[in-house]
Amino acid sequence: MIHQSGNILTDRQLVDKVLSGEMQAFSQLIGMTEGLVARIVYQLVRNEEDRKDVAQDVYLKVYQHLKGFKFQSKLSTWVGQIAYNTCLNRLQKRQLAIYDPPAQDGDETAGGRAGLFRAEDETDRMLLQKELRSLLTAGIARLPPLYQTLISLYHQEDQSYQEIARITGLPEGTVKSYLFRARKQLKETMFNKKEKL
Amino acid sequence: MSGIHPSDEVLQEYVEGRSACTPVEIDHIAGCLDCQGTIAAYRMLAGALKEQPAPAFNFDLASAVIARLEPPRQVRKRREGSVLTAVLIAGVIIVPAWLFRRSAYFVFTDMSAAFYWVLLAAAGVVTAFFLLRLYKKYQDVINLINK
């Protein structure tokens, strides 16, 4: 659903407008779902140029297949599903490198470096939060690309387990289980050192 | 409070919302400092994840995609062409027919046999022309397949 000059445009209205040839409506559709597509593409495709190509391919496919959209899910979920499959197809066809960040020192955890639970004043807390954020970014980068995508969709794009299952084609239980593992891995990366001290 | 710690999954569910936790687990968590510590870490993690910067494409995606959408524009043009043709046909046939509707009967009753033949011959020529074009198209497709 999108807002257009105060009016709420439903998925169906938007699709109808695009199908009737309104390029402005298609542009709105892209604007509405671009964030979600970026989350998926950035987690799965490493090269910047390839990301550009993939993103465009996603929306060309959306345009070509929009007539076949049955409104059985949210339009954004359907676009996300196309984005995910396009990334996978690209990776299979061209064998692009899946993002694989360099390994980092295991001792660089939030607890160990920042003394997380010892913050006494506001300045310390802000510094710790900053530290935590950078460690989290590094921690996410260490996760397998699929876990990164799931974390991104669930915690940042607020997609439900069911929607993520639709996008990725994985069973809902598997999505849940992978998310549990990913969060556990992140928690351990960030807080384990503290527990050891 | 029971002495068995709930699993990590249960503690994550607790952070998401307690609906998936049993009363025994909730009771344990309420009185267990270890579990509360883990929950605090997961809460902090969830908050930090939410604040992660969103990736964004560094180019105008909508313009780039729309620039590559040529066929729909042609369809639109074709549709506009069809509307124009319909208007022309209406102008040439329907409007005069309406204007001369009172004398239309005499047009057909007063025609000579020779004129009928001319009309039939013209229809035959037009039909033959379209059939030839269809045959040529068919030959082109066959040649393309056999190449």
Image (spheres, coloured by chain):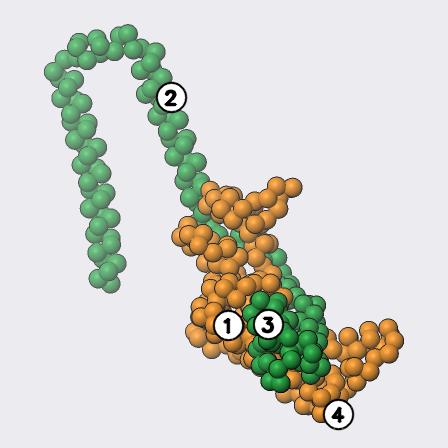
Chain colours: A orange, B green
Cα gap from disc 4 to disc 1, whole angstroms: 33 Å
Chain letter of the residue carrying label 4: A
Q: Is mark 3 on a helix, strand or loop?
A: helix
Residue underneath mark 1 = A175
- Work out whether mark 4 precedes mark 1 in sequence or the reverse, and give the earlier one: 1
Q: What residue type is labelled 3?
A: Pro
Residue at (82, 73) in percent of width and height? A126
Name above or below for residue A131 compared with residue B70.
Answer: below
Chain letter of the residue carrying label 1: A
Q: Which mark is residue B23?
A: 3
Residue underneath mark 2 = B91
In this view, the mark in front (4 or 2): 4
Residue at (36, 17) in percent of width and height? B95
In this view, the mark in front (3 or 1): 3
State which quarter of the image contains the C terminus of chain B. bottom left
Residue at (62, 60) in percent of width and height? B59
Q: Counting other residues with Cα less than 10 Å from the Cα at mark 2, is it few (<14), some (14-19), or many (20 or more)? A: few
Cα gap from disc 2 to disc 1, whole angstroms: 64 Å
- Work out whether mark 3 precedes mark 2 in sequence or the reverse, and give the earlier one: 3
Q: Counting other residues with Cα less than 10 Å from the Cα at mark 1, is it few (<14), some (14-19), or many (20 or more)? A: many
Q: Is mark 2 on a helix, strand or loop?
A: helix
Name above or below for residue A14 compared with residue A81.
Answer: above
Cα gap from disc 3 to disc 2, whole angstroms: 80 Å
Residue at (26, 8) in percent of width and height? B103
Q: Is residue A90 left or right of residue A118?
A: left
Q: Nearer the viewer, residue B112 or A36?
A: A36
Q: Where is residue A41 in the image (x, y as percent from the top left)?
A: 55, 68
Q: Are marks 3 and 1 on the same chain?
A: no
